[in-house]
Every structure is written in structure tokens, then in C-alpha cells.
């Protein structure tokens, strides 16, 4: 037993595995509760505007966590913070099953549970990428792309496994499923106590928050993160409604044809790039992906054939797959002393994009008398801006070399 522990403590493959499970945990805390929204309405008499606030609060808490962690994670250390992130994820998921019963207004219990697991999700988002970046590996770009694909596989697993559970055991047993999903962060919490974790930069060598703010390249990477998050979520958050409206199918089929297909394509793009990363230029791949993303939004918006429109929606997942991890990899290479603060702020800007993209689509749809297809067209600005940012980075790199 002791020799096994020694091996685990020295084996960075265990660190990579734990990091994969970390992103699956984040996928659980972000995507499980929305599957239960109608159940919350029927069981707890929750209003739809309260459900909307539950989503906003979740991502808002993650944004605040990103901001706070930029200052304090390096002082506390990676291991205590990532273990705490998983503890909070467990408590939040289990709390979602039991806390509503402890309040006279069950909604307050849901809010408290969501706030707890949102802090855990925010810490995971900030910490996992620098933990993997600090691991000894030959091709960091491939490792980062494969790492981020596990969020997609986690998203798919949450939708498929939850749908199967509800079909076999009944939606009334959702509390059992919440506790079952909590087992994944519980196991990963123990794993992160054992695996080796290195620092991205030594104490005192990383760029300060003020130094990052003065760096022009950092702000270009921040722009790319906003555009990445907005391009991704602008389509992803509306894909279920797009499928239901375009194909006139049930919500279950809409979830499978919309967000599930989107997530599969996004995960496939990240896994494929990881396999061929040594043969492909990251910046060229990202530029090509941005162009494909523009085309996908145009197809989804203008196609008169619902199936072709849905294909554009799914392929959009393929186009946005590399944007988020690719920006992280370019930032790590372009600003090697950026440290945890850089990753924390990039995650923050990515989350800003995740909020801005779907909001813009919703506002445009409302302005266009509920025409979601035309509303989606508003989000095409984000892959276009990402292309502009990539060209600006290329110009900045050339200027730096002269």
C-alpha cells in the first residue's frame, strides 16, 4: 500500500487523470441543475425568473472566484485550493438534494447549494489549466486541448446518464442522482491529495496583476478569451431551443440534437487537435476555426432547411472547440511568467464572454420579434473579432522580434 502511494505521489499521469476528472466535475456543477428546472418548478413552486437568476448567480459567483483567486491562490498553494474546490463541489451537489427541505422557502436552499458548488467550479476553472501546464510534458498545446475536451465529454455524460437515470428510476428520484454525481468530485478530492503538483512559476517570479495590466499582449489574449466564450456559449445556450423550434421535437430530443451534438463536436475538435498538434500551427488552426464558426452561424441563421440549420449548429461546436484551450496555450507560451494570476484573469474574461454571447443572442431575438434564427446572427461578431485579435497578435509578435 505504501509503495502504491509513493508511485502515485511521483507519477504525473495521475495528475493529468485528476485534472481530466476536474473538468468533468465542472461540467457536472454547470449542467446538472438545468436538467431539473421543470422539476424545481413543480416540486418547489419556483418561478422562471428565479431559475434565470440561479444561472446568473452560478456564473456570477464563478466570475468573483476567478477575480479573488488571482490574488490569493499562489499564497495559499495549488493543492489546498484544488482539494477545497472539490470539497465545495461535493457539498453543493449534495446540498442541492437536501438544503431546500431545510428552508421555509426551498428556493433559498437551491441558491445556497448553487453558490457553494459555483465557488468550487470557479476554482477548478482557474487551477486545472496551470496545474497541467506545470506538468513535465513535450507538447503542452496537445495536452491543454485534450484536457479541455473532458469538459465536453462531461457535459455529454451529464445529459445522457441523467436522461437514462430519469427514464429508468423516475424523475422523482433526482436527489439520489445528485448524490451519485457528487461521488466523482469526492473521489477526485482524494486523488488530488496524493498526486504530484508543481508550481507554474516560482515564488516571486510571476507577473503581478499590475504588470499584467500594462502588458498589451495580455489584453489581446483577454480579447480572444471573451470572443472564445461568447462564440461558444452564444450557440450552445440556445441550441436546445433552436432544435425544438426548428424541428418541432420534444425537449429530450431537442437536448440530444442541440447541446449534446454541439458538445460532442466541440470535444471531438479538441481531441483531434491534441492528436495532430505537432503537425498543425495553433494560430492557423484557430484562424481556420474562426472562419468555420462564422460560416456555421450564417448557415444556422439563413438556412431554410431545419436539418441543415441544425447541422450548422452542431458544426459550430467543432469550430469553437480549440478557441478556449488554444488561447490558454498561446498565452502560456507568449507570457511564460504570467503565472496563476494570468490564468485566473483569462478564465474571468472567458466567463464574461460566456455571459455576453447568449445575452446578445437573446436581446437580438427579442428585438427581431422572437426570430431566434436571425437573433443568432448577432453572435457572428465574436468569431470575427477573434480573427482580428489573432492578426493583431501576429503583428505584435513580429514587432517584438524586430
Image: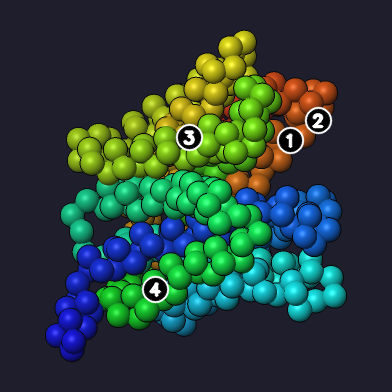
Q: Which residue is mark 1?
A: 362
Question: Does 236 sit left or right of 187 as displayed?
Answer: right
Measure the alpha-carbon separation of dots 1 and 3. Answer: 21 Å
Closest to the camera, between mark 2 and mark 4, is 4
Measure the alpha-carbon separation of dots 2 and 1. Answer: 6 Å
- Relative to 309, does residue 394 appear above or below in the rendering? below
- Relative to 123, does residue 266 appear above or below in the rendering? above
Compare residues 79 and 236 and report the one nearer the observer.
236
Q: Which residue is mark 3?
A: 261
Q: Is residue 69 visible?
A: no
Quadrant for the N terminus, please: bottom left
> Circle 1 sits in a helix, a strand or a loop, which is it?
helix
Seen as rendered, the residue at the extreme top is: 304
Are the residues tagged 2 and 1 within 8 Å (C-beta)?
A: yes
Q: Which residue is mark 2?
A: 366
Q: Residue at x 36, y 59 (%)?
A: 20
Closest to the camera, between mark 3 and mark 2, is 3
Query: Could you say which disc has been placed on residue 387 in the image?
Result: none
- Residue 311 x/y as whole percent: 50, 22
Amino acid at each position: 500500500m505504501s509503495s502504491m502511494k509513493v508511485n502515485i505521489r511521483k507519477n504525473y499521469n495521475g495528475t493529468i487523470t485528476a485534472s481530466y476528472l476536474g473538468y468533468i466535475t465542472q461540467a457536472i456543477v454547470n449542467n446538472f441543475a438545468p436538467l431539473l428546472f421543470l422539476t424545481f418548478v413543480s416540486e418547489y413552486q419556483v418561478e422562471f425568473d428565479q431559475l434565470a437568476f440561479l444561472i446568473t448567480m452560478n456564473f456570477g459567483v464563478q466570475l468573483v472566484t476567478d477575480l479573488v483567486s488571482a490574488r490569493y491562490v499562489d499564497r495559499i498553494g495549488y493543492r489546498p485550493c484544488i482539494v477545497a474546490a472539490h470539497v465545495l463541489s461535493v457539498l453543493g451537489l449534495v446540498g442541492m438534494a437536501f438544503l431546500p427541505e431545510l428552508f421555509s422557502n426551498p428556493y433559498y436552499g437551491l441558491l445556497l447549494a448553487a453558490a457553494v458548488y459555483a465557488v468550487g467550479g470557479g476554482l477548478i476553472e482557474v487551477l486545472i489549466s496551470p496545474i497541467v501546464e506545470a506538468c513535465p510534458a513535450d507538447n503542452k498545446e496537445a495536452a491543454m486541448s485534450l484536457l479541455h475536451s473532458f469538459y465536453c465529454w462531461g457535459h455529454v455524460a451529464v445529459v445522457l446518464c441523467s436522461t437514462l437515470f430519469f427514464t429508468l428510476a423516475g424523475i422523482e428520484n433526482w436527489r439520489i442522482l445528485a448524490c451519485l454525481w457528487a461521488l466523482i468530485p469526492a473521489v477526485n478530492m482524494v486523488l488530488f491529495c496524493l498526486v504530484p503538483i508543481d508550481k507554474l512559476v516560482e515564488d516571486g517570479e510571476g507577473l503581478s496583476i499590475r504588470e499584467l495590466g500594462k502588458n498589451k499582449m495580455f489584453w489581446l489574449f483577454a480579447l480572444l478569451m471573451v470572443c472564445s466564450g461568447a462564440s461558444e456559449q452564444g450557440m450552445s445556450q440556445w441550441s436546445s431551443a433552436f432544435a425544438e423550434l426548428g424541428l418541432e421535437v420534444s425537449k429530450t430530443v431537442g437536448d440530444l440534437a442541440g447541446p449534446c451534438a454541439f458538445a460532442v463536436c466541440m470535444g471531438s475538435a479538441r481531441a483531434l487537435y491534441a492528436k495532430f498538434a505537432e503537425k498543425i500551427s495553433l494560430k492557423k488552426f484557430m484562424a481556420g476555426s474562426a472562419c468555420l464558426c462564422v460560416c456555421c452561424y450564417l448557415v444556422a441563421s439563413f438556412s431554410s432547411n431545419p436539418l441543415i440549420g441544425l447541422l450548422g449548429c452542431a458544426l459550430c461546436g467543432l469550430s469553437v472547440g480549440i478557441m478556449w484551450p488554444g488561447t490558454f496555450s498561446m498565452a502560456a507560451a507568449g507570457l511564460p511568467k504570467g503565472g496563476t494570476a494570468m490564468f485566473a484573469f483569462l478564465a474571468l474574461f472567458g466567463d464574461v464572454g460566456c455571459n455576453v454571447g447568449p445575452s446578445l443572442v437573446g436581446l437580438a431575438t427579442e428585438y427581431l420579434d422572437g426570430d431566434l434564427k436571425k437573433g443568432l446572427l448577432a453572435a457572428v461578431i465574436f468569431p470575427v473579432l477573434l480573427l482580428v485579435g489573432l492578426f493583431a497578435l501576429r503583428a505584435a509578435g513580429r514587432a517584438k522580434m524586430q
